[in-house]
Every structure is written in C-alpha cells, then in structure tokens.
Amino acid sequence: MWLGSSALRRQHGRHSAPPEYVAASRGDIAAALRLHRREVRSGLRLALVEGPKTLLDLHRGDHRIDRLFVDRASMTDAVVSALLVDLPSEVVRLADGAAMARLADTRTPQGVVGIVALPLPRIATDDEVLLILDGVQDPGNTGTIVRSALASGVVGGVVCLGGADPFGPRAIRASAGAVFAVPPQVDPEDSLDGILRNRRLIGASAGKGELYDRLAWTEPIALAVGSEGHGLSRRTSARVDTYVQIPTVGAISLNAAIATSILVFHIARERSRCT
C-alpha cells in the first residue's frame, strides 16, 4: 500500500484518513497493454488515454475511467492531485517508471495513463455537417481533424472509413480528447447512401473542383476527406456530388488536417452569416 501525499491529505480534510492506493499487478499491466491493439480496443470498447489534463477533463465530462495508472513521482502534480481526489481509490493503481513507459505511447511519459470507456458514436443532425474521413492513415491527422471539427461548432458527426483508429493513442493525443466529445463511427455497416441520408456529398480535392470560398455551404452536406497519398476511394468518389479545392501556391499541397480545418471553419463562418 502507498499513502497519498500531504497535499492529498489536506484536500481530503485534516482529520480524514488519506486514500490508500494499490500497486499495479502484472495482470493489471498486461490487461492494459492489450489495449495497444486496435481490435482489442474495438472489442472491449476501451482505450488508453495519457495525460492528467485530458483525463481530468474526460472524468469531469462524465466519461467512465475504469483504471488509472499513476507514477509515484507524479503524485505531487496539481492536476494529478485533482484527478485523484475525484476518483475512487479502488480505480487507482500505482506503477513504476518502467511500467509507465510500457503503457505510454510517448517518449516522455506524463506520469498518468487511464483506461477509459469508449462512448457511443455521435450521429449528426440534418442541420449539422457530417465529416467523412475516407482512409486517412495518419493518426495525428485523424486526431487533429476531429479536434478542429469540434472547435468549429458545425460538425455534428464523424465517420471513419478505414484508415487510422480515432481511438488509438496518437489520435486521442492529437485530438486533445475531442474524439470523446464527437465520437466517430468507425467502419459502419450502413451503405454510403445510408450514411449520407440525402446529404449533398462534397469531396475535398488537392487539384480539382470549385474553389472552397465560392461554394454554398448552407444546405445539408457531408464533407469527405481522403487519404494523404491517394485521396478519396473509388467508392466515395463515385458518390461525390461536388469537388472542392483550396488554392495553394506552386506545387505545395496541404495535408488532410490543415485542409479540413480550413474548410470546417469556413463552413462555420458562412453559416453564421445566414443566422
């Protein structure tokens, strides 16, 4: 057993018994390490989330944290302390630096890794933009796109067709937890027509289509963004109603995350003018 720091004792009250935390067992660590595999995350509907601020935000947003691994050296951090105060002590497991390095996906672990339940996908209403990520392979781009989608205020749902897992460690980190606020549908069984539900499908393109600032964005739409190397798949391309492009200088093109961010914030601006 390990007793909480003096700071934690003060936060629990002068006369309250400090929380007792159990050291992580080999079984605890082994079960968590399985979540590095996409198929396990999908089957169990759980994901590993790293970083005290993201975990605190998720907890206070009513997302379920099943297990919290904490490095003893991080116990004095103010955000970690706030997280520990909020969580039942039986959820917490203490882990040494070597174990945390195995659990974390970063070269410099932040001292806290949680197992968080995956939320149900959010379905966009007819008034909201549906964002389709068609084979976006880079998890950093996937996470950044979802983060921008949430920040724009106009995207109500995200669908991932192939590509990176939005609930993988890199995608979660790049999204700053946004994938839990706008949980994507991953490889849904519905046909593309079923996903679109009579929306006009706008395909983002690197070199063809209308300029993005000349298009009317006020009708019910879905915006499709393709993979970094190959663009939209044949399946999605066959269903596109209009292609749109962002003009660039010379041969330089924008990556998927930057292009999508520009488009969703432009859509937000255009729609705000109509209200």
Image (tube, rainbow, N blue to C red):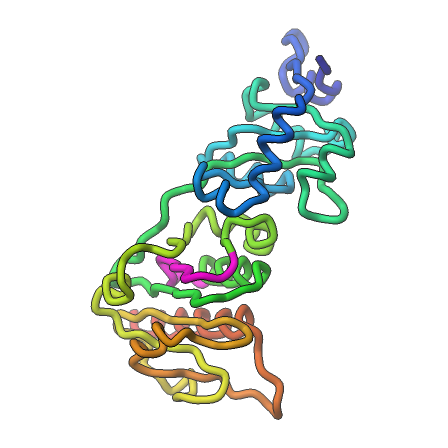
Above or below 65: residue 107: below
The percent position of residue 13, horizontal first and vertical second, equals 64, 14
Of residues 137 and 247, the one drawn nearer to the viewer in this rendering = 137
| Magenta stretch: includes residue 137 | no
**Side of 72 where 189 appears, left or right:** left
Residues drawn in magenta? 152-164
Residue found 71% across the figure and 27% down from its top:
95
Residue found 30% across the figure and 71% down from its top:
221
Residue occupying the far bottom of the picture: 250
The percent position of residue 240, horizontal first and vertical second, equals 32, 78
In which quadrant is the C terminus drawn?
A: bottom left
Q: Choose top left, top right, bottom left or bottom right for residue 274.
A: bottom left
How many numbered marks appear? 0
Of residues 254 and 136, the one drawn nearer to the viewer in this rendering = 136
The percent position of residue 116, horizontal first and vertical second, equals 51, 36
Above or below 275: residue 14: above
